[in-house]
Amino acid sequence: MADERGATGGGALGRPAREATSAAPGTTRGPGRVLVALYGVFALAAGARAAVQLSTQFDEAPLAYLLSAVAAVVYVIATIGLARGGRGGRRTAVVSCSIELAGVLVVGTLSLLDPAAFPDATVWSGYGQGYGYVPLLLPVLGLLWLRHQSRLAQAQGDGPDRTG
Amino acid sequence: MSTPLVVAATVVAVVLAALGGLSTALRRRIGTAHLAGTALLELLLLVQLGVAVAALARGDRPEDLPTFLAYLISVVLLPVAGVLWARSEPTRWAGTVLGVATLAVAVMLWRLLDLWEVTGG
């Protein structure tokens, strides 16, 4: 990592940050990048889990495992939408974040009311209990961030977002 | 899987997340402390990977081998992905991005340990 030092520099805690977060729209800038990182981790976690469950133990709990797979796909689409930005990316992300929010609320409620229907946990069981409730928090943060972004874009004449 | 190693790596990961948060709070990008910490974390994870592979080679098998392997490989890649991504972020949120990656590493390590302790026949 010695070769990376020159590019980062500025002492142990890094050089002062550029303050461009609120001026330029773009879903992957500033806090948006934190969201994309979180979504990426969840896409990975849910995807790996669904792949294992569907390939090795599908018969045990088809409904729960299919839901895991749906959750994984939604996370991947939301990650791509947020990462791409622009009007299309934002719209994709809004739809997938909404599905996510609905999913975590519906599955969370059902898994508490009728535990027998969900013999094995999905990411959305118990409102994302097994994942520190992050699955419940993520779509809310995502939608708030997207609303903020589309307002910025509108304020700037609804031009195309800068991506990346 | 070695519990002391998991504890050591978790401590490094949590300290890194705190450093990342500090950089964000101080409106700074990530610096040498973050890079050194991530290098140390990656080293611990690679040693952990070696220990796990050696145990698998000896014939020890966790019950849920596919999940164990998926976690084992992803956990080694996460700090690298996190640091690369944080370094290309020009705003103060770089540290938080790194923190997300290292906290995910900490969680995954304990999940790995759980998976390992449920040994199959």
Image (spheres, coloured by chain):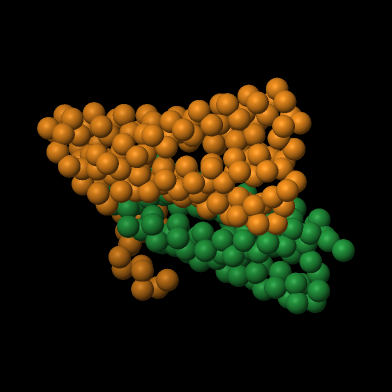
For the N terminus of chain B, which image quadrant? bottom right
Q: Which chain is orange?
A: A
Q: Nearer the viewer, residue B1 or A39?
A: A39
User: Is A136 situated above or below A64?
Assistant: above
Q: Which residue sits at x=50%, y=60%?
A: B79
For the C terminus of chain B, which image quadrant? bottom right
In which image quadrant can residue B64 be found?
bottom right
Q: Which residue sits at x=36%, y=69%?
A: A4
Q: Nearer the viewer, residue B9 or A62?
A: A62
In which image quadrant can residue A86 be found?
top left
Left or right of A76 on screen, residue A132: right
Is residue A41 visible in this depiction of the protein? yes
Q: Nearer the viewer, residue B13 or B74?
A: B74
Left or right of A108 on screen, residue B118: right
Q: Which residue sits at x=55%, y=36%?
A: A134
Q: Farthest residue in the left direction?
A: A157
Left or right of A142 on screen, residue A52: right
Left or right of B77 on screen, residue B90: left
Q: What is the x, y in percent for residue B99?
A: 48, 49
Q: Which residue sits at x=47%, y=42%?
A: A74
Q: Which chain is green?
A: B
Q: What is the x, y in percent for residue A157?
A: 12, 32
